[in-house]
Amino acid sequence: MTAYGEPTVVGDGVGELVVLWGGFPIVGAAAGGLLAAGAGWVTGLAWAPAQGLFRLVDGLPDGYAMGGGVGLGVLAGLVIAALGTADRVLVTVDGTRIRLRHGDTEQEVPRSRTRVAFVDGKDLVLLDGDAGELVRQRSDLPADRLAAALQEHGWPWVDADPHRDEYRRWVPDLPGLPTGADALLRARQEALERDRRDEARELRAELGRYGVVVRDDAKRQYWRLTRSGRPPQ
């Protein structure tokens, strides 16, 4: 227990796990069974893809074809459930720290380092006293639940990014960036365009060491400088 009571946990709850591990395998089984049952009909459609596979299924005994289709559908559903589970975010807040668990990774940030907290689109963001990002965690958690949890424990919550107007869209060779930051932004742009999320996240952290804060809009990058990253006036 803290000065602000028991920790508050914000997550999608058991219901999402039931949907993931119960619903998706059932839907997959039904879809697989329908595809197996309709394999003969699909082979008559000249424009349909994977004709070789459907002809193979159509040539199997009905029991084998149906069992295989259902089994593959269940397997596909289980794979989707596993991916969905790995992408779940759980936020635990008390009066001294916040813990963010994303799949198998966990990050902890003390209250003493946090100057402001807010939601930017689907991202929970915590800023330090230098206006640098301590956390930018994407999730589908409702902003009002996150706000209520942090405010309950005395965290400095605001409704919008106080530095929103400072961002500029990145284009190659744009002046004003610290030396070396433009090359990192070029590499990160390529990672975004190729959907290499882990690499883009690592490059975001590296840019933070240069005093550059990045936010994304689709696959466009916008940047601003922290207080210590700004050139002297």
Image (spheres, rainbow, N blue to C red):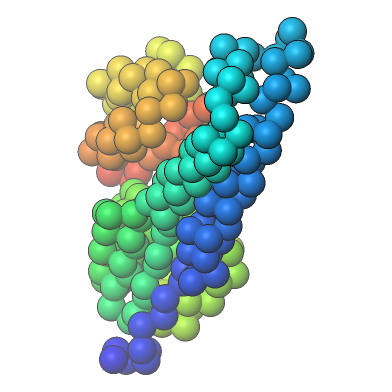
Task: Establish if 90 lies above or below 173.
Answer: below
What residue is rendered at 58% in x and 64% in y? 142
Q: Quadrant of the N terminus?
A: bottom left
Residue at the outermost front position: 61
Relative depth, front residue between 63 and 213: 63
Residue 1 appears in the picture as rendered: yes
Task: Establish if 218 lies above or below 91.
Answer: above
Relative depth, front residue between 43 and 165: 43
Q: Position of residue 229 (x, y in %)?
A: 30, 38
Q: Position of residue 107 (x, y in %)?
A: 27, 59
Q: Position of residue 33 (x, y in %)?
A: 62, 40
What residue is rendered at 61% in x and 16% in y? 55
Q: Quadrant of the C terminus?
A: top left
Task: Establish if 32 lies above or below 192.
Answer: below
Residue 84 appears in the picture as rendered: no
Relative depth, front residue between 228 and 218: 218
Count all numbered tags in the image, as a single digit. Answer: 0
What residue is rendered at 42% in x and 59% in y? 89
Q: Position of residue 199 (x, y in %)?
A: 31, 30
